[in-house]
């Protein structure tokens, strides 16, 4: 085994140069010039280390090390795109670690029993199409309905069809669906994007579940009135009622011992004037937890509190737009393999949920899937200050190498 930290750093620095802002942040939006430059560099690097490359008509780059047998491949990788002015490690690290494993196999002359395909997904972040995330993995697995390709448009009005026309094989009327054959497994290495591993002094996290999410909106209706002439005891202030609910939601989550998180990220007041008591407020609520029963319990607690708020502040509160993303468990057999490999390498790890979404949650609907986390310094992500220690990255890459070898040698 020849995983080398020097090679990891070199490849990381090269990828980080594409889309780098003056403040050190990365802006590498899918199909942008910096994205395409990074993709061309990766494609050439894949060829240098003996991988067979292709780019599908959505823009997912794949590099395959053939196996001795014609069998479905083990997929490994992450996403190449970033959020605006984001961090250099998010997504890219999973591609880099997988490629370093493939480079070491070429150096060693290791031939796997089944193929391994390193994939660099496009448009995971959901930046371009109003929060529609993981589009590259949805396309690759056949989930994305490309009959609606002209419906997907950026804020500036550019269609998905126009964006992907940058690929030579693409023409305005040629957009075939290219779902992958069912793979044997998908493994994604990613930064944690939180600080649990750092707090516990551990070098790796083995993901058990990608948490479920419930989004909904609270519509709070009071009565708009003059801010000066309306006595305090006569007010039906929707803003104060919203503040009460925000405090309740926050305090309950804070005391829940990390079993769930809850966020009020957006608030819209009407008429939104300094000298008018707010008559109506729309308040977004997001709940994330490893199990849906936790989300349901929290949702019921909020609904019970709504009744108290309605009485106290003489308002009405409606729940609107409830939308669920179910928890996605990782494959138990892959988790056991990864744990066994971690034990053999002496790598301290923590079994933990992922509190953020990833391409792995899409791939898990089609094949056994596992995730490996690298600690994030101070839990910072989606920001220029995003960092991980290369000593931790090296150890995680060694664990990834050992896990992939187990999968391709055992023929599972």
Image (cartoon, rainbow, N blue to C red):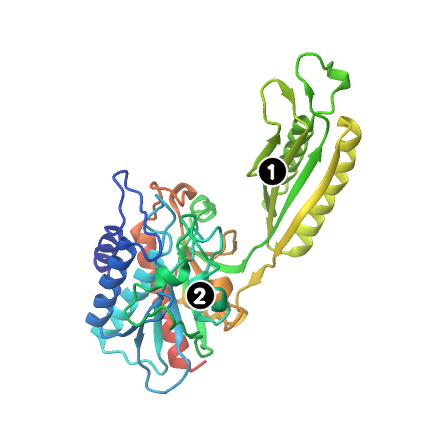
Q: Position of residue 79 (x, y in %)?
A: 38, 59
Q: Quadrant of residue 5?
A: bottom left
Specify whether residue 403 is in view: no
Q: Identify which residue, 10 or 86, lies in the foreground.
A: 86
First along the sequence among labels 1 and 2: 2
Q: Which residue is mark 1?
A: 254
Q: Residue at x 33, y 80 (%)?
A: 112
Q: What element does badge 1 sit on?
A: helix
Q: Quadrant of residue 62?
A: bottom left
Q: Position of residue 407 (x, y in %)?
A: 41, 76
Which dot marks residue 130?
A: none
Q: Residue at x 42, y 81 (%)?
A: 72
Q: Which residue is mark 2?
A: 137
Q: Residue at x 77, y 40 (%)?
A: 304
User: CA–CA distance between discs 1 and 2?
Assistant: 34 Å
Image label count:
2
């Amino acid at each position: 085994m020849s995983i080398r930290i020097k090679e990891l750093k070199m490849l990381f620095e090269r990828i980080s140069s594409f889309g780098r802002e003056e403040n050190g942040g990365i802006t590498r939006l899918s199909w942008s010039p910096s994205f395409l430059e990074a993709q061309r560099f990766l494609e050439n690097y894949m060829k240098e280390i003996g991988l067979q490359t292709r780019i599908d008509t959505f823009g997912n780059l794949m590099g395959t090390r053939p196996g001795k047998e014609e069998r479905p491949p083990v997929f490994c990788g992450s996403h190449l795109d970033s959020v605006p002015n984001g961090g250099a490690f998010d997504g890219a690290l999973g591609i880099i670690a997988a490629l370093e494993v493939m480079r070491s196999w070429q150096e060693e002359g290791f031939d796997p029993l089944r193929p391994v395909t390193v994939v660099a997904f496009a448009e995971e972040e959901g930046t371009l199409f109003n929060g529609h995330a993981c589009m590259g993995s949805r396309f690759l697995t056949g989930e994305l309905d490309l009959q609606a390709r002209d419906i997907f448009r950026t804020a500036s009005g550019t269609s998905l069809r126009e964006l992907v026309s940058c690929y030579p094989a693409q023409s305005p009327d040629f957009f075939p669906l290219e779902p992958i054959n069912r793979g044997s497994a998908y493994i994604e290495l990613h930064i944690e994007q939180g600080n649990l591993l750092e707090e516990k002094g551990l070098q790796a996290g083995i993901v058990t579940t990608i948490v479920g999410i419930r989004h909904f909106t609270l519509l709070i209706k009071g009565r708009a009135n003059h801010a000066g002439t309306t006595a305090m005891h006569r007010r039906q202030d929707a803003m104060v009622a919203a503040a009460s609910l925000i405090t309740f939601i926050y305090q309950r989550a804070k005391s829940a011992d990390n079993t769930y998180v809850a966020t009020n990220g957006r608030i819209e007041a009407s008429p939104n004037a300094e000298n008018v008591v707010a008559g109506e407020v729309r308040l977004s609520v997001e709940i994330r937890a490893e199990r849906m029963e936790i989300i349901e319990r929290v949702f019921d607690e909020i609904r019970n509190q709504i009744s108290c708020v309605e009485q106290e502040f003489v308002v009405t509160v409606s729940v609107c737009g409830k939308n669920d993303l179910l928890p996605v468990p990782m494959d138990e057999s892959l988790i056991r393999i990864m744990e066994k490999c971690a034990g053999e390498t002496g790598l301290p790890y923590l079994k933990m949920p992922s509190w953020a979404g990833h391409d792995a949650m899409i791939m898990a609907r089609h094949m056994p899937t596992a995730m490996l986390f690298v600690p994030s310094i101070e839990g910072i992500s989606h920001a220029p200050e995003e960092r991980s220690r290369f000593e931790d990255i090296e150890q995680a890459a060694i664990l990834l190498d050992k896990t992939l070898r187990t999968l391709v040698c055992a023929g599972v």
